[in-house]
Amino acid sequence: MAGNTEPLSPRSRLAVTAGKAAAAVSRAAGRGSGSVIGGKVALRLDPDLLQRLAQHLDVVLVSATNGKTTTTRLIAEALRANGEVVSNALGANMPAGITSALAGGSNARYGVIEVDEKYLSGVAKDVTPKAIALLNLSRDQLDRAAETRMLAERWREGLSGQKAVIVANADDPLVVWAASSSPNVVWVAAGQEWKDDAWSCPACGGVMQRPGDDWFCAECGFRRPTPTWALSGDHVLDPHGSAWPIHLQLPGRANKANAATSAAVAAAFGVPPQVALERMYAVKAVAGRYDVVQYEGRDMRLLLAKNPAGWLETFSLIDPPPTPVILSVNARGADGTDTSWLWDVDYGRLAGHPICVIGDRKLDLAVRLEVAGVDFQVCESPADAVRRCPPGRIETIANYTAFQDLRRAVGN
């Protein structure tokens, strides 16, 4: 357990108070949770505040292109078996949002923190984590984030001096490349559905060979490490070969993979796999994701998919045809303004579903669906789309800001 440290300095206390006040004003004005603006104000007054707030915590950082928010929530639930947890549970994952979250955790033992991929190295330097979970890397927000190989290199450089336990996905070559600079890595066979960003070797640029579940580069010898934890169907295999059942209310293979990684992280803090996995069952939804809501007299399940890898995983968990599907895509600042990624998604998988399209970029999406040969209707609003859907529960898939718009529209 992290040792207790001296109380916050007067300057730090002032920064925390000012940040909370700014957040409260933002909430009162109806501008969201206020966590980002609160953190920005606090850091302006005390640039070292994040480091000070983390001093007394055993910190876990979670970073990836997909699955960060859910895995952060699962790890937090598991670690609560051992003590109080503070976490940025709503996904504000840049330094300002992380600072806001930690400001509310003065009595906590653990900090479980989701970190945006670009900020991982800097946040790790500030909070001295005990563990870092690395799930996957794939293309996302091409106009904001670096190309995936560059991002992996940045992780690799930032993690090279880390004393933290790195819990990393052995099935993602980019993650393995980034993590293998660290002296203490726990490898998890969590799987990798989306492989289109990992066909060339991150070490030398050679063509990656992928026989079965294995992968290796024939040119330089870079290859998949032997995992000590693994997802195997509905079970997690621990380093002793014991199989522990996964009991989740969250759907899909991807969430079982998130649970496997979370169990490995929890074990690093002394929480046994059985206890960790049982506690994860309490999670029904994560920041609105997977919620089933009533809207216009219909049941709607809300699903988030932000990039090609995320859409691929989401398609695998929706109900089969003729279940109606609403798709919504925006391209605002938080999404990335480049929608060229739509062409990397195999929308042909939606054949047979009645589809309605909404969102700021509904026409971009309509062109993509037309080329994929999928039938669809372009609609003006969520209410319009629901009225046009045939009977049955509606699956609603949206990217980041479109998802937030939908939650507001349906009162979630």
Image (cartoon, rainbow, N blue to C red):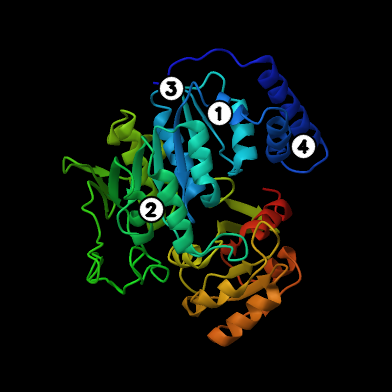
User: Are the residues flagged by discs 4 and 1 in contact, CB closer than 8 Å?
Assistant: no
- Left or right: 47 with respect to 240? right
Q: Kindly identify the residue that appears in the image at 61 percent across and 29 percent down.
A: 48
Front-most of residues 205 and 200 = 205
Residue 370 coordinates in the image, percent (x, y): 60, 85
* Label 4, label 2: how far apart the Cα atoms are: 38 Å
Asked whether residue 19 is in view, the answer is yes
First of labels 4, 2 by sequence position: 4
Q: CA distance from mark 1 to mark 3?
A: 21 Å
Disc 4 residue crowd, few under 14, some 14–19, many 20+, Cα 10 Å: some
Q: Amino acid at mark 3?
A: Gly
Residue to which mark 2 is pinned: 178
Establish if 148 lies above or below 130.
below
Nearer the observer: mark 4 or 2; the answer is 2
Disc 1 marks a residue whose amino acid type is Gln
| Location of residue 332 with respect to 12 vertically, above or below | below
**What residue did someone put label 1 on?**
51
- Would you call the spot at circle 3 few (<14 residues within 10 Å), some (14-19), or many (20 or more)? few
Q: What residue does disc 3 label?
A: 83
Q: Earlier in the sequence, mark 1 or mark 3?
A: 1
Where disc 2 sits, the SS reads helix
Q: Quick one: label 4 or label 1, which is nearer the N terminus? A: 4
Q: What whole-number distance in Å separates the C-alpha atoms at marks 2 and 3? A: 31 Å
* Mark 3 residue element: loop
Is disc 4 in contact with disc 2, using a CB cutoff of under 8 Å?
no
Q: Residue at x 57, y 37 (%)?
A: 88
